[in-house]
Amino acid sequence: MIVNKSEHITVKGHRGTWYVIDNGYFTPNVIPGENTIGIKHLFLLEHEIHGDEAACVIVDEAGELILADVWNGFDDLITAGWEKADAPELHSWYFTFGTDPAFKYRRGWVEVRAKNGEEACEKFRARCPDRPGHEGTLNCAFVYSEESWKRTIMATNGSNMGEHCHEVIE
């Protein structure tokens, strides 16, 4: 899953690797009431070697190519028949860490902003992959919804075993 700070991205049909320079929410311009695609979170990527000397590409969160040969950013997407859309409401999910040396962090937590728990787990796994041999098990101690988090001592005192929020993933 691609996130705002992703880099070293490969795009099917294109050489080299890419990194995110912009992102936004868009929907295809179709007949009202007949939009079956919905709002998509799209990313404008620049080539890691050629930079602004080469055309950019636009991909979705899964890395699927939406538009190639992009020279004018998301304006090219709008010209191709897409419309800018409002970002969906995001909620916070909290992934906590204990003292296990296999965790990316010791103690503290990572906050993930997502539409739902499934998306939060996907975003978390993009930054903190499951351990080899433990695929399907999140590489953290516990996961809290925003509502559950507010009832914890960690939210009250702002600390998990002396550590705080390590990063926020959006």
Image: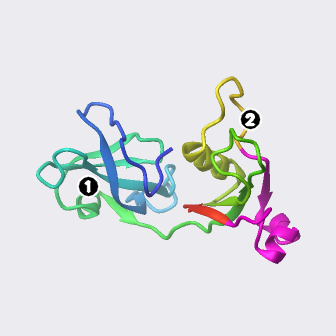
Q: Residues within 10 Å of mark 1 (few under 14, many from 20)?
A: few
The image quadrant of residue 75 is bottom left
Question: SS at mark 1?
Answer: loop
The image quadrant of residue 30 is bottom left
Mark 1 and mark 2 lie on one chain; the one further toward the N terminus is 1
Check disc 2 and give the amino acid type.
Answer: Thr
What's the mark number on residue 119? none
Q: Which residue is mark 1?
A: 80
Q: Would residue 155 be counted in the magenta stretch?
A: yes
Labels in figure, total: 2
Q: Nearer the viewer, residue 120 or 31?
A: 120
Give x and y (percent) for residue 162. Answer: 76, 66
> Residue at image x 75%, y 55%?
96
Question: SS at mark 2?
Answer: loop
Give x and y (percent) for residue 94. Answer: 72, 59
What's the mark number on residue 137? 2
Give x and y (percent) for residue 15. Answer: 23, 33
Relative to 87, 125 lies left or right: right
> Residue at image x 25%, y 35%?
16
Which residue occupies the extreme bottom position in the image? 156
Q: Would residue 136 be counted in the magenta stretch?
A: no
Check disc 1 and give the amino acid type.
Answer: Ala
Q: Residues within 10 Å of mark 2 (few under 14, many from 20)?
A: few
Which residue occupies the extreme top position in the image? 133
Q: Nearer the viewer, residue 144 or 102?
A: 102
Say how the picture is coloured. Answer: rainbow
The image quadrant of residue 25 is bottom left
Q: Nearer the viewer, residue 25 or 5?
A: 5
Q: Which residues are magenta?
A: 140-164
